[in-house]
Image (tube, helix red, strand yellow):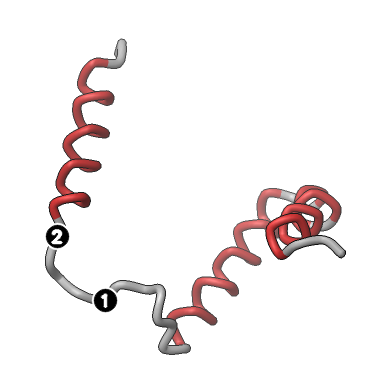
Amino acid sequence: MPNADQTVQEIYHNIVGNLSVSDRLRLAALILNDLTQQNVAVIDASNSWTEQDQLELTSFSLQYANSPA
C-alpha cells in the first residue's frame, strides 16, 4: 500500500500536473483558503520570528544578493 507522500506525489503527477497554469493557481487558492478557514495546527499564526526563521531569511538574502543580476 502506498504511503501518504507517494499518494500526494501521484495525485500531483497524474492530475495536477496536467492542469493549465491558471487551473493550478485556482486549485492552490482553493487549498490555501480551505486551510485558512480551518484552524490548522501546522499553521504558525504567531508574529514572532524564531532563530531558525532569521537564519533562513539571512541565508536566502545572502544567496539572492550574491546571484548575478
From the viewer's perspective, tell me whether residue 65 is left or right of residue 14. left
| Alpha-carbon span between mark 1 and mark 2 | 11 Å
Q: Position of residue 34 (x, y in %)?
A: 54, 81
Residue located at (27% from left, 24% from top): 63
Q: Position of residue 58 (x, y in %)?
A: 17, 36
In which quadrant is the N terminus drawn? bottom right
Relative to the observer, which residue lies in front, 66 or 9? Answer: 9
From the viewer's perspective, tell me whether residue 30 is left or right of residue 40. right
Q: Position of residue 37 (x, y in %)?
A: 46, 87
Q: Quick check: 38 above or below 18? A: below
Relative to the observer, which residue lies in front, 22 or 43? Answer: 43
Q: Amino acid at mark 2?
A: Trp
Name which quarter of the figure residue 22 lies in.
Answer: bottom right
In which quadrant is the C terminus drawn? top left
Residue located at (75% from left, 55% from top): 6
The residue to which callout 1 is attached is 45
Label 2 sits on a secondary structure element that is loop
Q: Position of residue 42 (x, y in %)?
A: 41, 74
Q: Amino acid at mark 1?
A: Ala
Disc number placed over residue 49 in the picture, else none:
2
Residue located at (59% from left, 74% from top): 30
